[in-house]
Amino acid sequence: MKKRIGIIGGGQLGLMIAQAAHRLDAFVTALDPSPDAPAFAEADARIVGAFDDLAALERLCEASDVVTYEFENVPGDILRHLEGKYNIKQGIAPLFDSQDRLREKDNARMHGLEPPRYRAVPAIDDVPLDAEACAALSPQSRLLHLGMSVGKIGMPCVLKTRTLGYDGHGQAIIRDMEDMEKAADLLSVPCILEEMVDFDFECSVIMVSDGKDIIHFPVSRNIHRDGILDLCIVPASGLQNGGGENDLCRRITASCESFMKSCSYRGILAIELFVKGDRFYFNEMAPRPHNSGHWTIEGCTTSQYMELCHFLLGLPLKRPELISPAVMKNILGQDLDAAKTVVAESLVGAGPGIEVSASEDVDNAFCGEAGKGVYVHLYGKTQSRPKRKMGHITFVPMTPERYYSGWAARFV
Ligand code: AMP
């Protein structure tokens, strides 16, 4: 009988988990509140339900031998209840630890990874105020609290809501008094204030552990625009010497692996870091496949999705090797037409100088090779808007130089 995998969340990560699971002949059920969630197109069974709908989550768990999550904000008490009854193989600890930026950074520090300097705000005598107390603060008190913390951390700094922030949402950069006054509004909920790291670059380490073995994927250099991942470049310049990883890269991966072991996490874990000189700082973690690992599908001998599925199904983990240098471009709403045109050109076999205007005929759910080494993944989302992740393109083999001199100009 087929092994049954349940996925909490039906976004693009769920879609790509389901694609890998099918290659291993598993049966996939996905749960998502949105009836047209991308993963539903690939899953064998679907449950339309909210992430805090206990009955719907229990139905998913009962329909599955093993359950994973691609959505991070399932409420903690619901998770605890499910963990006691069903096989949520990663456990809920890494999810719980990542749901609150304060807890996440305290935990990183406790287990050997250094975050940028940070403080909980609002706080009295270093004790953070809870949500109710924050909501009750007057605008003047908010500004006072923020001013005191900015005084300790220094400018420039970044204010972030402790929960539910993503892709730059719920964040404000503070460079001067005017920014501070604008940012103070965020303090109607608990926040943390971080020093702004003048980093040389950002990178991420994606690991999978079965409790015995731990593997990591080649480290990618990540370029963000407006707080959203734009490009991943592998191998990561700055972390290489000659043909291999430099000492800094080895220190980064060793620290991340040691963190994962020290926390006793199992399954998949992505850690985003800032690199400055020969130092690196923990930014955040995600116990699920990560946007910065999409490129592993074509760029590595095994992908982050496949290794998560190996873990879920109790199969041995496979150590990933880079096949060729790769570049991954995130396709946000504003890039969707350009991505469709890339597909349309490949379908009609257009060469240089031949104009193609067939992009509207390309399905929003296209997934395949559009020209040699150009792997287009469109997630099938029905509604496109600027800054929404609609797909990605992985170019393999590709160097950043070739990407910037040729492909970059095609996107917004
Ligand atoms: P986050 O949601 O915390 O990952 O933030 C999104 C992006 O904002 C990061 O990938 C960085 O590009 C930038 N950012 C966040 N925090 C900091 C920081 N403390 N210093 C410098 N840049 C930051």
Image: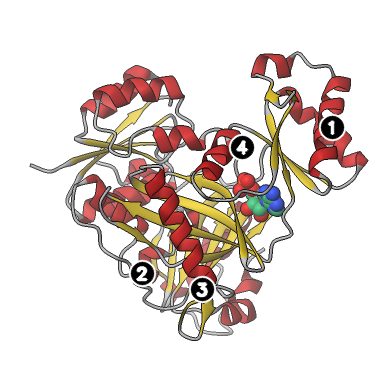
Mark 1 sits on what residue? 148
Residue 325 screen position, x and y as percent: 46, 77
Q: Earlier in the sequence, mark 1 or mark 4?
A: 1
Q: Nearer the viewer, residue 17 or 300?
A: 300
Compare residues 128 and 18 and report the one nearer the observer.
128
- Provide the residue designation for mark 3: 247
Q: Do tag 3 and tag 4 residues touch (Cβ < 8 Å)?
A: no
Distance from mark 4 CB to nearest ligand 1 atom below 8 Å: yes
Closer to the chain start, of discs 1 and 2, is 1
**53, above or below 243, in the image:** above
Label 3 sits on a secondary structure element that is: helix
The answer to which of marks 1 and 3 sits earlier in the sequence is 1
**Can you say whether 242 is above or below 124 in the image?**
below
Q: Which mark is residue 165?
A: 4
The residue carrying mark 2 is 300
Identified at 71% across, 27% down, the residue is 126
User: Marks 2/4: CA distance?
Assistant: 30 Å
Whether the residues at callouts 2 and 4 have beta carbons within 8 Å, the answer is no
Residue type, mark 3 in image: Asp
Contact flag, marks 3 and 2 (Cβ < 8 Å): no
Indicate which label's residue lies in the foreground, 3 or 4.
Answer: 3
Judge whether 297 appears above or below 58 on screen. below
Give the spatial CA distance, label 1 vs label 2: 48 Å
Real-space Cα separation, disc 3 to disc 4, in angstroms: 33 Å
Classify the position of the N terminus by image quarter: top left
Asked whether residue 316 appears in the rendered view, the answer is yes
Real-space Cα separation, disc 1 to disc 4, in angstroms: 23 Å
